[in-house]
Amino acid sequence: MKTIQSNLVKITLIALLIFTVSCKQTEENAAVETKHKETTKEKNISSENIIKNYLNLKDALVKDDKELATIHSEYLSNSLNDFNNSIAIENKQDKLKKMIDKAIKNANLISEKEIKIQRENFKKLSKNITDIIAITATEQPLYEQHCPMYHGGSSWLSDSKEIRNPYYGSQMLKCGIVQREIK
C-alpha cells in the first residue's frame, strides 16, 4: 500500500512539474509573440518617422530657416539610421540599404552648411527619400512636386497639394507643380 501511495505522490509531482513547465513555455511564447508585434510596429513607425522628419526639414527650408533645417536634418539622419530595412521585399534589401546610406549622407551634409548648400543637398535627399518610399511604401498620401527653375528642375515630396517651394523659400514660394500623388 505504501508503494502505491509513494508512486501516486511521485506521479502527482511529475504531473505538477510538467504542468508548471508547459505554462512557463506558454508564457515565454506569448512574450516572444508580443515582442515580435512591438518590433513590427516599431519598424512601421520608423519608416513613417523618416517621412515626418523629411517633411519637417522641407518646411524649414520653405521658411528660409537654416537653424531649423539643421535640427530637422539631424532628426532625419537619426530616423534613417534607426530604420530597419528588413521590412523591405527580400530581394531589394541591398538596394534599399544603399539608398538609406545615400540619404543619411545627404541629410548629414544639410546639417553642416549654409541654406544655399542645404537646398542643393536637399535636392539629392529628395531623390533618395522618393526612392526609399518606392520600396517601403507609405500609408499617408504624398505629392511629388517639381520646380522647373531650380538647377534645371528639382522635385520634392509634400503632404499637401499646395505648392510651398523649399528650394527658393520666400523668394518664389509658389513656384512649382504637382507631378503625381504617391500612395
Image (spheres, rainbow, N blue to C red):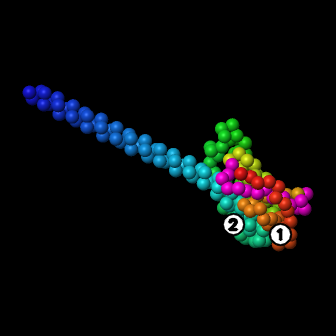
Mark 2 / mark 1, whichever is N-terminal? 2
Q: How many marks?
A: 2
Q: Is residue 180 above or below residue 114?
A: above
Quadrant in the picture for residue 126: bottom right
At label 2, which amino acid type do we have? Ile
- Residue type (three-letter) at the residue carrying disc 1: Leu
Q: In percent of the image, x 86 and y 69: which residue is there?
A: 172
Q: Which residue is mark 2?
A: 71
Residue to which mark 1 is pinned: 173
Q: Which residues are magenta?
A: 137-152
- Image point 67% across, 56% down: which residue? 140
Quarter of the image where the N terminus is located = top left
Q: Is residue 94 magenta?
A: no
- Residue 109 position, x and y percent, is 76, 59
Compared to 134, does 51 lie above or below? below
**Residue in the foreground of this view, choosing between 164 and 70:** 164
151 inside magenta stretch: yes
Q: Residues within 10 Å of mark 1 (few under 14, many from 20)?
A: some
The image quarter in which residue 64 lies: bottom right
Please rate how many residues cluster around mark 2, counting C-alpha atoms within 10 Å: few if below 14, some from 14 to 19, many from 20.
some
Q: Secondary structure at mark 1?
A: loop
The residues tagged by marks 2 and 1 sit, at their Cα atoms, a distance apart of 22 Å
